[in-house]
Amino acid sequence: MAFVAAAAGCLLRLRAAGAERHWRRFRGVGLARGFLHPSATVEDAAQRRQVAHFTFQPDPEPREYGQTQKMNLFQSITSALDNSLAKDPTAVIFGEDVAFGGVFRCTVGLRDKYGKDRVFNTPLCEQGIVGFGIGIAVTGATAIAEIQFADYIFPAFDQIVNEAAKYRYRSGDLFNCGSLTIRSPWGCVGHGALYHSQSPEAFFAHCPGIKVVIPRSPFQAKGLLLSCIEDKNPCIFFEPKILYRAAAEQVPIEPYNIPLSQAEVIQEGSDVTLVAWGTQVHVIREVASMAKEKLGVSCEVIDLRTIIPWDVDTVCKSVIKTGRLLISHEAPLTGGFASEISSTVQEECFLNLEAPISRVCGYDTPFPHIFEPFYIPDKWKCYDALRKMINY
Amino acid sequence: MAVAIAAGRVWRPNRGLSQQQQFSSLDDKPQFPGASAEFIDKLEFIQPNVISGIPIYRVMDRQGQIINPSEDPHLPKEKVLKLYKSMTLLNTMDRILYESQRQGRISFYMTNYGEEGTHVGSAAALDNTDLVFGQYREAGVLMYRDYPLELFMAQCYGNISDLGKGRQMPVHYGCKERHFVTISSPLATQIPQAVGAAYAAKRANANRVVICYFGEGAASEGDAHAGFNFAATLECPIIFFCRNNGYAISTPTSEQYRGDGIAARGPGYGIMSIRVDGNDVFAVYNATKEARRRAVAENQPFLIEAMTYSPSPILPPDPHSREPTLTWGPLPLCRIGHHSTSDDSSAYRSVDEVNYWDKQDHPISRLRHYLLSQGWWDEEQEKAWRKQSRKKVMEAFEQAERKPKPNPNLLFSDVYQEMPAQLRKQQESLARHLQTYGEHYPLEHFDK
C-alpha cells in the first residue's frame, strides 16, 4: 500500500543505494519533464509514447482579482498555499516529502518562508496523516494535508469517512474538523498505471459530511483550493497531475475564492449538455468543437467542479434546455459519479430527455499501463456517444 | 526508501559520489543514517523479554497502605475524597444504567467496573483544560470533571437534553466545556487525532497536554502505530494512556499480542514509557502527573500502560450484607463487567478467575482502605454517601426517562456546517411523509 514511488521522469520512486543519486539529479529538474516528451533516442515513431489525449484550454485572463502572473497548475497551488499560510497563522502543511517542495513541487519554498513547524514531513502513513490532520483541525487550527497520490488515500478511508465526515454530526456540533483540507494528485498521467492514475472521487461521493472538489485549470485550482481551506467542512481537493506542468495560464497573485458546490457553464449551447470535471473538461471542450464542426451540433459544456455536494440545479437547468446529457470521467463506469448525475437528472428532467443519458467512462478494470490509450474516455469515444445521442 | 530520503539530508547534494568521505582506516565506525549504533561481529538475535516484563509501578499495597513513603503524592483530603466519590458515583451510575439496558430502557451500555481508578487517577493529575481523547470506557474522567449526571443520562437516553442531539449510541459522551472530545465507536481512530491536537497545542504555546486513552486491544490497530510514530517524530506533548484490562471482548491478551504488552512498544518508537498498577489510584496519579509535566516542558510523548483486570458479570449481592442491592462494597474488579451489554463474558471467563479479582483488589476498596487509615472516612459517611449517591443517580435517571426525544429535524442538521440544498429537500420530504404516515412513527416520544 505505501509502496509509492517518488518521481523522476517516470513515476516510480527509486529504492536502494542508487536512489538518492537519481533523486538528487531530478530534484532540481522537476517531475513532469518526462511526462509528455517523446523519448529522443527512439527512432521508430510507432513506439514513441503517446502525446496527451487532450489540449489544455486556458481561460481568458481574469481581470477582477488584480495583478496576474503566468502560472502552471503546481505553481497556482503553491500560490494558494502561500496565501493561506500568510493570512492564517494557525495554518500548517504536512505529508510525505512536502518539506523539500513535494514530489510535484507544489510546496516549493514554503518551508523556508514559513518555518519548519508549519511545513513539515510526516512519516509514511496515510492513515496517520489524515488522523493527525483531523486532530489539528479539532483544535481550530487549519490543517492542509497532502496525500502523495490519490491512489494511496485508501489507508485513510476510515479516518475520512468514519471520523472527519461525521465529526460535527455525531458530536451535536460540539466538535468539528472543518478546518481540514486534504490535497492529492489525481487522474491519468499517460503512464501511471494502476497506482498513479486513479480518480477515487466516487468512493467519497457516497459520504455525507465531506466536500470533494476537482479543478480543471490553474486559475480554477487556486480559487477552489482557497475556498476549500476556508470552508468550515473537511474537504478533499484532487489535483489533476497531468495538468501540473501542461496547464499554464494567467492567475492572480492575490488570494481569491471560487465558490464550492457551483458548477460552471463554460460554454453555452442548445443541443446537448456535456458534463465533466478535471482534465476531462478539456476533452469534452474539444468534443464540443468537433460536434459543431462535423455535425453542426451546439453543445453546452459544464465543469462540475464540486463532486459533493454537487450543483444539481445548474446541470438540470441545462438538460431541461438541451434534452440530452453526456457525462464523462476517467474513473470506471460502474458506480462512477456519472451514475449519480444520471440518476438524479432522469428523476428531475425525465420528460425533457430526448435520448438516454450517456456515460463515457473508463472501463471496469484497474487502470492499465500499456493499454492506457485504449482505456481512457478520449474525445473519439465521447464524440461517438454524442453522435448516437443526436441520432437517437 | 527511508535510506534514500534520509541520505539527502546527510550527504551534500552537489558533490556527487566521486568525492566520498575519507574514513580513517583504523576507526571503522558505521555511518548509516538509519541507525546510531556500533558494529558487532557476533551473530545474535535480540530475545524479546516477556517472562519478566516491564515492572508495574505501584504506590499502595492492596490494603491501601503506602509502600514507599517518598512516592506518596500527599494529596489533600478534599482531593482524595473527590477521587473516591467520583469512582463510587460512577460505579453507582454504571449499575443503574446497566440494569436499565437489561430492562430495555436504553439500547446499549458499557460499564467501567474496575477501571474507575485509571480514569480518576489520571484526570486528577491533569489541568482541567487538557484535551481528552477517549475510547469509550473513560466516563470517570468526565465524572471527575463534574459532568452532571443529567447529561450522562441524557446522552444514554438520547433525550432532548443530550448535547450530542441524540445521534449516537449510549456512552458516546462529549463535552466541549470540559475538553472531552466526543467518543466515536471505531477503535483507535482517536490516537493520531490526539497527536494532531497536541501538535497544535505545542504551536499555540498553550502549555496544555493532550491525553489519549485506549485499550490494549485497540492498540493493535494501525492507527495506534501511526499515532505513536507521529507523536515521537513530530515531538508532541501527549500522554498515551493504555488501559490494559486483559481482554478485548472475548480475546485475551495472549491472542492480542506476543510482546510485553503495550509499554514495551513505546521504546520502539522512541517514547518514554511506564507500566502502572491501574487499580492503584495514586500510582496512576503520580505517573500521569510526571508525564504531564515533562510532556509539556520537553514536547515529547509519554506512554502509560495501566494494568487492570477485565470485568465479569455483576455478581449477586452478598447474602450476608444488610445492604439492599446495588452496593459497590466488596465488589468484583476489573472489567468485572461484560465488555458491554451485548456481551456475556461467562462464555469466556472462568468463575474462579473472576472471584480472585473480586476478593483481592479493586481501586475503590483500596482507596477506601487508605481513607479509613487516614481517618478521613468512616462507616457512617460510607452509608450516608451510598444512600446519597444512589438517590442522585435515581433522580437523574427518572428525569432522563421522562424527557422527550429531540425533534426529528435534528436528524438532518450538522452534516455540514450549512445544510446543502439536496439535504434540505430530503428533510422536507420526510416532513411531508410524516404528515400522511405519521401514525406509523413514534412521534409522541419526540419533541414537536
Image (cartoon, coloured by chain):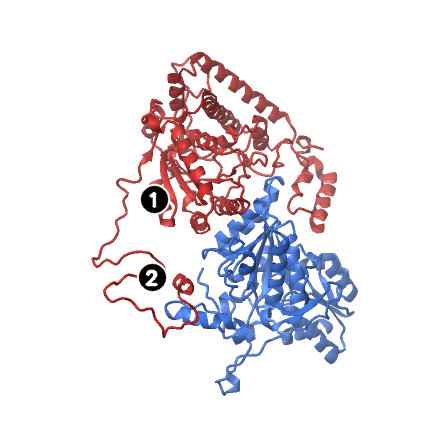
Chain colours: A blue, B red
- In this rendering, does residue A213 appear at all? no
Name the element at disc 1: helix
Q: Position of residue B189 (x, y in %)?
A: 49, 46
Q: Position of residue A5 (x, y in %)?
A: 46, 66
Q: Quadrant of the C terminus of chain B?
A: top right
Q: Which disc, if any, is residue B264?
A: 1
Q: Residue at x 52, y 37 (%)?
A: B130
Q: Which disc, if any, is residue A266?
A: none
Q: Nearer the viewer, residue B321 or B373?
A: B373
**Which residue reaches farthest left?**
B42
Residue A213 as seen in the image, left or right of residue A151? right
- In this rendering, does residue A263 appear at all? yes
Circle 1: residue type: Ala
The residue wearing badge 2 is B32
Gap between marks 2 and 1, in whole Å?
25 Å
Circle 2: residue type: Phe
Relative to B230, does residue A147 appear above or below in the rendering?
below
